[in-house]
Image (tube, grey):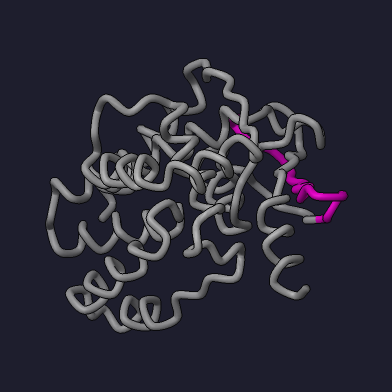
C-alpha cells in the first residue's frame, strides 16, 4: 500500500510540475455533443476504460465534463455507503466487486478511482492498480487545465464537490484547510499553504452540481 501511495504521489507531482495545456470547457457545446452524439460519447468512455493511450487532454475533458449531461449524473449527492462499509470491514473482494458496480454509474469519480487503486493494491492486482492511477492522473490533469483557480472567472471546473477535495488533497497537497464558502457558483477554498500552488485560496466552479440540484427540486 505504501508503495502504491508513493507512486500516486510521484505521478501527481508531475501534473503540478509540468506546464499544463489550457483547455476551454464550454458546457453548452459538451451538452450538445453528449445528447446528440451519445454513441460517440459512449465510445470515448469505452476507450477511457481501456486506458487508450491515444486519448488527448481534450478527450479526457469531454469524458469528465460530459458525464454531467448523462442520466447517470447525480451531482454531489452520490453516496457509496455499502462500498465504504465493506472497505472498513476489509472485505476486499466483495468491496472490489461493489466498486466496479459503482463505477458503472460514475466512471469519472476521482474518489472512486482512489478507492479502486487501494482495493486493487490490497488484492495485489498490479496492472489494474496502474490502470486506475492513469485514469486518476488524466482526469486530474483535465480539471486543472480548465482554469487557474485564482478567480471566479478562471476557477477550476469540477462536476462534484468530492472532486475538488481530491484536487486539493492529492494534487495540490494543501495544508491547513481553513474555510469553504460559496461565492455565486463557485466554492472558495481557503488554506494555509500548498507546495504546488501559489496563493492560499482556490476557486472551484461547481455550477454543474448546483444546476443539477436546482433541476432536481423544480
> Relative to residue 163, is residue 17 depicted above or below?
above
Residue located 40% across and 76% down the image: 84
Q: Please indicate whether residue 211 sits to the left or right of residue 139 in the image.
A: right
Q: Main secondary structure of the magenta part?
A: strand
> Relative to residue 5, is residue 200 depicted above or below?
above
Residue 184 within the magenta-colored segment of the rendering:
yes
Quarter occupied by residue 204: top right
Residue located 70% across and 52% down the image: 177
Front one among 166 and 55? 55
Residue located 52% across and 20% down the image: 20
How far across and down, in percent of the image, does residue 148 sit? Answer: 68, 28
Front one among 193 and 49? 49
How far across and down, in percent of the image, does residue 200 sit? Answer: 76, 37
Q: Please indicate whether residue 100 sits to the left or right of residue 156 in the image.
A: left
Q: Which residues are magenta?
A: 181-196
How far across and down, in percent of the image, does residue 126 sit? Answer: 14, 49
How far across and down, in percent of the image, does residue 15 sit? Answer: 46, 28
Residue located 57% across and 41% down the image: 32
Point out the residue furthest to the right here: 184
Quarter occupied by residue 157: top right
Q: Quadrant of the C terminus?
A: bottom right
Q: Please indicate whether residue 154 sits to the left or right of residue 142 in the image.
A: right
Residue 155 within the magenta-colored segment of the rendering:
no
Amino acid at each position: 500500500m505504501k508503495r502504491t501511495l508513493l507512486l500516486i504521489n510521484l505521478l501527481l507531482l508531475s501534473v503540478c510540475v509540468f506546464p499544463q495545456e489550457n483547455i476551454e470547457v464550454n458546457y453548452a457545446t459538451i451538452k450538445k455533443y453528449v445528447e446528440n452524439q451519445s454513441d460517440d460519447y459512449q465510445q470515448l468512455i469505452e476507450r477511457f476504460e481501456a486506458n487508450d493511450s491515444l486519448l488527448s487532454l481534450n478527450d479526457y475533458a469531454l469524458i469528465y465534463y460530459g458525464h454531467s449531461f448523462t442520466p447517470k449524473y447525480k451531482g454531489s449527492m452520490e453516496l457509496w455507503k455499502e462500498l465504504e462499509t465493506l472497505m472498513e470491514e476489509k472485505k476486499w473482494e466483495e468491496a472490489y466487486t461493489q466498486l466496479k458496480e459503482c463505477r458503472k454509474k460514475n466512471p469519472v469519480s476521482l474518489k472512486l478511482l482512489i478507492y479502486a487503486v487501494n482495493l486493487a493494491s490490497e488484492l495485489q492486482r498490479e496492472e489494474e492498480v496502474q490502470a486506475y492511477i492513469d485514469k486518476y492522473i488524466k482526469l486530474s490533469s483535465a480539471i486543472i487545465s480548465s482554469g487557474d483557480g485564482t478567480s471566479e472567472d478562471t476557477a477550476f471546473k469540477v462536476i462534484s464537490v468530492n472532486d475538488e477535495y481530491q484536487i486539493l488533497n492529492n494534487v495540490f497537497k494543501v495544508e491547513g484547510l481553513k474555510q469553504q464558502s460559496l461565492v455565486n457558483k463557485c466554492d472558495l477554498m481557503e488554506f494555509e499553504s500548498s507546495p504546488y500552488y501559489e496563493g492560499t485560496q482556490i476557486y472551484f466552479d461547481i455550477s454543474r452540481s448546483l444546476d443539477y440540484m436546482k433541476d432536481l427540486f423544480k
